[in-house]
Amino acid sequence: MGKRLLKQWIGKPLVDIKMLTERADAIEELIGSQSHPVLIKMRRMLGMRLPDLEKSLVRIQYGKCTEKELLKFLEVMVELTATFGSASLVGTSKPPFRSSLLQDIFAGFAAVRDQAIEYRSELDAKAILKGEYENIVSLAFTLNLPSICKPVGTFSRILNWNLSPLVQKKC
């Protein structure tokens, strides 16, 4: 676990002083805000067994993911976006954090919230779990399937850019 990220860090270390400062400020704010409700929710979610979202995105993009894997990915994205992309965290007059880096992370969740909910609602979880794959998606969703590439790209940007700046931002 974390092997790809470690390889990325070693291969492309962050050298931008501005980004390093932003990251340090964000970490300092997180450490100083341990009782913040959002951080309590984060700790709860991090304690759950989450799938490898980056790997799932790649498998979805290349058409290699299983129906169960797609279902699990969308369920996790719905949970993440509902928890951390809610209107109460984004778009309010007083943002939950001072750090622009943290604000961008939560704005990213809000950006994909509706798409994640829409795609998850089109899948029949009972059929997938039973292995009855003939009718797992609605006809409207099937006809609109080519457009899934745009949200997959958006989800990917959320994971690779918005979620990882505390660790490493791609330059």
Image: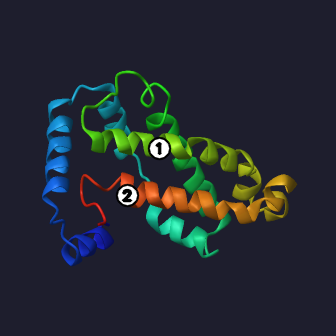
Could you tell me which quadrant the N terminus lies in? bottom left
Which is more toward the observer, 127 or 13? 13
In this image, 78 relative to 166: left or right? Answer: right
Q: Which residue lies under the disc numbered 2?
A: 161
Which is more toward the observer, 41 or 28? 28
Where residue 146 sits in the image (x, y, percent)?
73, 66
Q: Secondary structure at mark 2?
A: helix
Query: In which quadrant of the rendered view does residue 97 lie?
Result: top left
Q: Residues within 10 Å of mark 2 (few under 14, many from 20)?
A: some
Q: Secondary structure at mark 1?
A: helix
In this image, 153 relative to 25: left or right? Answer: right
| Residue 91 appearing in the image | yes
Where residue 169 sits in the image (x, y, percent)?
28, 60
Looking at the image, tell me whether mark 2 or mark 1 is earlier in sequence order: 1
Residue shown at 45% from the left, 29% from the top: 91
Q: Which residue lies under the disc numbered 1?
A: 109
